[in-house]
Image: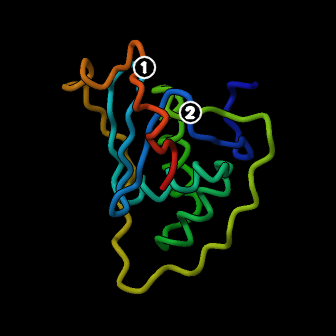
Amino acid sequence: MSSQLHDDSCLVANDQDVAAKVVDGEAILINLTSGLYYTMDKVGGFVWSMIVRGSSVEQVSEAVAARYSVPLAQAREDVRRLVRELLDEKLIVLSMGSPEAAAPVGPAVENSQPYETPKLTRFDDMADMFALDPPLPELPALKTGGT
């Protein structure tokens, strides 16, 4: 698996070590190995939902640009930065496979939320509680990587 990020790189959630859920458009992620947890705002939640589907950087960028009516260049820059952070935190991995065909994203929704640069916020205040060593028996019941 190549660790170099390209616009056609297939992004996937690190389902082995991460439990995630999108709630009211915001993503909540827990790294079960480190116990760190993270949140991403509404744009970040949308990006996460695209990653869970196995999208490429370019597919995510195009979807963000279309959904939030921002220039593609800005969306691409913001998505690349966020993806690098997610990779650094081991919340996602690059896959050898081809990205899934992204579902078409319609035009920006009228009265939609204004675009804000997606950001990953990291919390370590409950790391001892969330880190699973050894994993708890309830763990398989968690839905990982889903929306």
**Crowding near pointer 1: few (<14 within 10 Å), some, many (20+)?**
few
Disc 1 element: loop
Q: Amino acid at mark 1?
A: Pro
Q: Quadrant of the N terminus?
A: top right
Lower position in the chain sequence, tag 1 or tag 2:
2
User: Would residue 137 be found to the left or right of residue 52 on screen?
Assistant: left
Q: Work out whether residue 15 or residue 117 is closer to the camera in this orientation and state it.
A: 15
Question: Mark 2, residues whose alpha carbon is within 10 Å: few (<14), some, or many (≥20)?
Answer: many
Residue farthest toward the left in the current orientation of the protein:
125
Is 114 positioned to the left or the right of 57 in the image?
left
In the rendered structure, which amino acid carries the disc numbered 2? Asn
- Tag 2, which secondary structure? loop
How was the colour assigned to the protein in this rendering?
A: rainbow
Across and down, in percent, residue 110 comes to 41, 86
Furthest residue to the top? 133
Taking depth in this image into account, of 32 and 44 the one nearest to the observer is 32
- Above or below residue 118? Residue 101 is below
Specify the farthest residue to the front.
Answer: 137
Q: Could you tell me which residue is drawn at 70 percent across and 45 percent down?
A: 7
Q: Residue at x 74, y 25 (%)?
A: 2
Task: Write the residue at 25% across / 18% down.
Answer: 128
Residue at image mark 2: 14
Q: Residue furthest bottom?
A: 110
Compute the Cα span from label 1 to label 2.
16 Å
Displayed quadrant of residue 41? bottom left
- x, y (%) of residue 46? 47, 59
Q: Could you say where residue 65 lies in the image, as x and y percent from the top left? A: 55, 66
Circle 1 residue: 135
Nearer the viewer's eye, disc 1 or disc 2? 1
Labels 1 and 2 touching (C-beta < 8 A): no
Task: Point out which mark residue 72 bears.
Answer: none
